[in-house]
Amino acid sequence: MSPSESDSYRLTRRRALAGAAWSAPVIVVASAAPAFAGSGGALDLRRGSSAAVLTTDGVDNYYDLQFTGLSVVVPTALSAGQLTLTVTFTPTSPGGPNGMVVFSAPTGWVASPAAGNVGTTVVLTYASSVTAGAEVQVQSGIHVGAELPTSVQTGTYVVTATAPGLASDAQSFATGSPRPARGVKPIPRPVVS
């Protein structure tokens, strides 16, 4: 072998590394970090048996959001006004109506917009402080409902619990179809209080 040929077959550091990259498996060492590292944890929104229910005002039928057993478990202490529930409505058809009527605020909560008003987002703010680990109950009842009858407004309510420094949690509640099934009796729609 001539000196020029031996140079072309000589093992260099670059060739060794290139070969190693193709031949040896890479071992990665990772440390597990908590899912919410650097935060105070996560809220736990519990739906209970809450649902979008069929209601009537005596003339038309609506799909309103009925809270039954809805609660939020809070991992850390919060000051008054820091725990919120945000209610949104996503219509079945894009661009469909998404307005919601506020009938009342659950006991211990403040509604925005206030009762008797319509909004595309309804925010319920808890008016008291909360101790770490507490489960905050939401008064059962229909506090928010569809602005328009079932023939026009169907979709999904989403309730999202939020608080500073905590991961949020959400629950979804789908309505029925534009024409409710025969034999399904609507319940009386609440009046604004």
Image (cartoon, helix red, strand yellow):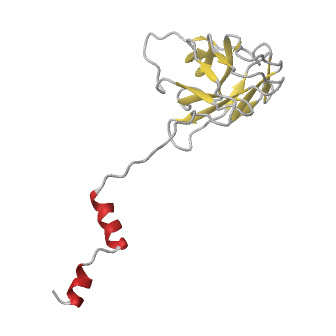
The quarter of the picture where the N terminus appears is: bottom left
| Residue 142 screen position, x and y as percent | 66, 15
| Residue 99 screen position, x and y as percent | 66, 34
Left or right: 163, with 50 as reference point: right
Let me know if residue 86 appears in the view: yes
| Residue at the (62%, 22%) spot, across then down | 44
- Quadrant of the rendered image containing residue 11: bottom left
Left or right: 112, with 63 as reference point: right
In this view, the residue farthest toward the left is 1
| Residue at the (57%, 34%) spot, across then down | 35
Above or below: residue 83 compared with residue 11? above
Q: Nearer the viewer, residue 81 or 181?
A: 81
| Residue at the (18%, 90%) spot, across then down | 2
Left or right: 133, with 1 as reference point: right
- Quadrant of the rendered image containing residue 125: top right
Left or right: 12, with 131 as reference point: left
Q: Nearer the viewer, residue 112 or 100?
A: 112
Let me know if residue 59 appears in the view: no
| Residue at the (77%, 19%) spot, across then down | 105
